[in-house]
Amino acid sequence: MIELNPIIHSQLRLSVLSILMSVEEADFMYLKQKTEATMGNLSVQITKLEEAGYIATEKTFQGKRPRTICRMTETGKAAFLDYVRILQEYIAPGLSEIEKTSEDYSCDGACHSADLLPC
């Protein structure tokens, strides 16, 4: 099987990219709140994603406060979608087993006395 992208396959970096896939842009404090990461760790992970070309950052000021805005790049979107596709390939066999198992236990409300599973 194909190896999962090590840049994306980090819990915090995956969280950041997942958030950015669902919004046009997000500032640092929003990402910090959503990921519950420390400022230092989030900063390091954003830098790694930026160095990989997966996100772009823009540093501005809001009044006297610095503000960092993050956006997905086209490269980042493609890498994320590729990561999801590969992950789906990894889990597909397990999902089909789960689906088979859940079909075996479906019933019309009567319990199976042999396996004592509720319906």
Image (cartoon, grey):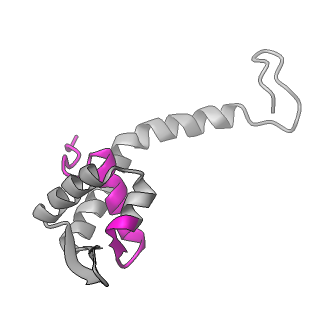
Q: Nearer the viewer, residue 18 or 115?
A: 18
Is 100 positioned to the left or the right of 6 in the image? right
Residue 97: % across, % down? 51, 34
Q: At 82% from the left edge and 23% from the top edge, which residue is drawn?
A: 112
Is 84 positioned to the left or the right of 106 in the image? left
Magenta highlight on residue 94: no
Q: At 44% from the left edge and 59% from the top edge, which residue is drawn?
A: 33
Most extreme residue toward the bottom is 63
Q: Which residues are magenta?
A: 1-29
Quadrant of image for the N terminus: top left
Q: Is residue 15 above or below residue 117?
A: below
Residue 102: % across, % down? 65, 36
Q: At 10% from the left edge and 62% from the top edge, which residue is drawn?
A: 51
Q: How many marks?
A: 0
Residue 85: % across, % down? 32, 55
Most extreme residue toward the right is 110
Residue 18's image quarter?
bottom left
Magenta highlight on residue 24: yes
